[in-house]
Amino acid sequence: NAGVTQTPKFQVLKTGQSMTLQCAQDMNHEYMSWYRQDPGMGLRLIHYSVGAGITDQGEVPNGYNVSRSTTEDFPLRLLSAAPSQTSVYFCASSYERSPGGYTFGSGTRLTVV
Amino acid sequence: SQKIEQNSEALNIQEGKTATLTCNYTNYSPAYLQWYRQDPGRGPVFLLLIRENEKEKRKERLKVTFDTTLKQSLFHITASQPADSATYLCALPFSGGYNKLIFGAGTRLAVHP
């Protein structure tokens, strides 16, 4: 049982480049979300999804896109990377109807130079 | 807007003592509150959930209280061990979002032998 799998673990981008952070879960969770974690600021919600075909914005959505074509996958796209997007990104999933706690991936450490 | 406050200063305690961490929130009344543990370089791990109608919840050496009048949760680790050293995050659902969580910045706990 893999849980939540994020790839890559580390990435360095140049300003203006685009990339996709991958997230997959094998627990049949309806709810998936992306957070970024910066020192002293805690986890901030970027985008979330309550099921396949349904996505919505969180607190800090600018510069990011998401899609949810299957229950298992929830990729996060950086459209044109900026140094302000240097952060650690976490994907999380849970059952939608019962707040039993999120399962987090191990994170992607992104540096934009 | 909703705010969660956790003590940003690290908590240093001696092995065997009880660690007490605080989570304060403002501007709304959440249906529940969650606590997570995060180790360096890893994603948060869910520990406990307490609902608004529960005053206290226990799990092994962990105890959580939830005071909706004070808008505060206390997280206790009894008989602490060096292995309990980590950052502890509290999380609440966004107002109007049952499963969408806002996280505090966390408090780092260091348990010394």
Image: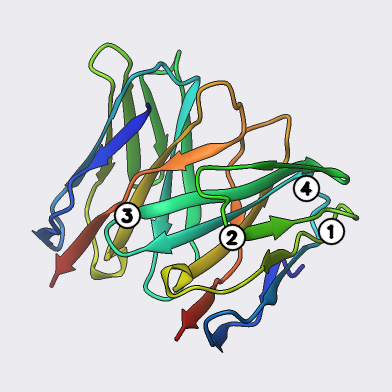
Identify the secondary structure beneath mark 3.
Answer: loop
Callout 3–callout 4 Cβ contact below 8 Å: no
What chain letter is assigned to the residue under label 2? A
Report, in whole angstroms, how far the alpha carbon at label 2 lies from the one at label 3: 19 Å
Callout 2–callout 3 Cβ contact below 8 Å: no
Residue displayed at 40% across by 46% down: B60
Mark 2 — residue?
Answer: A63
Identify the secondary structure beneath mark 1.
Answer: loop
Report, in whole angstroms, how far the alpha carbon at label 2 lies from the one at label 1: 23 Å
Label 1 Cα neighbours within 10 Å, binned few <14 / some 14-19 / many ≥20: some
Are callouts 3 and 1 both on one chain? Answer: yes
Are callouts 4 and 2 both on one chain? Answer: yes
The tag on residue A72 is: 1
Quarter of the image with the C terminus of chain B is: bottom left
In this picture, residue B111 sits left or right of residue B91: left
Amino acid type shown at disc 3: Met
Report, in whole angstroms, how far the alpha carbon at label 3 lies from the one at label 4: 27 Å
Which of labels 3 and 1 is toward the front? 3
Taking depth in this image into account, of A60 and B105 the one nearest to the observer is A60
Label 2 Cα neighbours within 10 Å, binned few <14 / some 14-19 / many ≥20: few
Quarter of the image with the N terminus of chain B is: top left
First of labels 3, 1 by sequence position: 3
Identify the secondary structure beneath mark 2.
Answer: loop
Amino acid type shown at disc 4: His
Quarter location, residue A13: bottom right
Which of labels 2 and 1 is toward the front? 2
